[in-house]
Amino acid sequence: MQISASFGLPAPVSGAQTPFHAGNETLALDRKDLAILAELTTNARASHTELANKVGLSSTALARRQKTLEDDGYIQAYQAALDLAQFGLTTTVLVRIALESQSDEALKAFEAEVVKCPSVVRCFLMSGTDDYILIVLARDIQDFERIHRTELSRLPRVARVQSSFALREVVNRAVPTVVFGETKR
């Protein structure tokens, strides 16, 4: 997915900032900041010169803005997107976990141990009937059976484990495009 510097936002008044809502807080990011962020989500290795040309700034101004976005916490990290199939990880499993109790002690005990599971790449505390949803990467179904036996079944306070295998990935975005003002699909 390529995100361009044109976001369908109204034309800015010189120096105007676009209000951006994050929770209950309204933040002021101008179009240049949004353009920088959009470009970095598609190519975090772009040089300052490349980014500056794409967003219409000098390299110095771009570097200053990027540093501010980092310092203000808008940019938390840079990472490489790997082709996991090259590492033999071709099976994605969504694992729903229900604990025997939702006490603070049970939640803390589970969370302290799930971070130690090397095959778990994401873990979410949930509302609803499941307490947690885990994203697990495995080589195949047999490998997942090993992960279930050696990692997941050893997690504390678990009452129920339900697994679903992803058949095919349809969308994988690092950032929803609405962040940059894009609403088109």
Image (cartoon, rainbow, N blue to C red):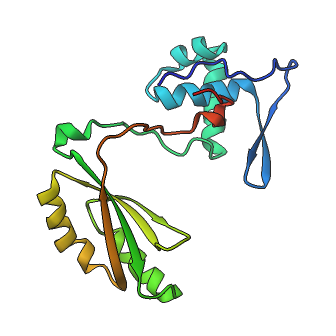
Vertical placement of residue 171 versus 155, above or below: above
User: Which x, y percent locates residue 182?
Assistant: 65, 28
Vertical placement of residue 86 versus 16, above or below: below
Q: Nearer the viewer, residue 56 or 121?
A: 121
Q: Nearer the viewer, residue 12 or 157?
A: 157
Residue 175 as seen in the image, left or right of residue 121? right
Residue 65 as seen in the image, left or right of residue 99? right
User: Which x, y percent locates residue 18?
Assistant: 80, 32
- Residue drawn 54% across the image and 39% down it: 175
- Residue drawn 52% across the image and 29% down it: 40
- Residue drawn 36% across the image and 84% down it: 159
Vertical placement of residue 174 versus 65, above or below: below
Q: Nearer the viewer, residue 141 or 6?
A: 141
Instruction: Please identify the residue farthest to the right as the structure is shown.
Output: 13
Which quarter of the image is occupied by the C terminus? Answer: top right
Vertical placement of residue 23 versus 169, above or below: below
User: Which x, y percent locates residue 167?
Assistant: 29, 45
Tally the marks. 0
- Residue drawn 85% across the image and 22% down it: 15
Instruction: Please identify the residue farthest to the left as the structure is shown.
Output: 142
Q: Nearer the viewer, residue 94 or 138?
A: 94
Q: Quadrant of residue 27?
A: top right
User: Which x, y percent locates residue 131?
Assistant: 47, 74
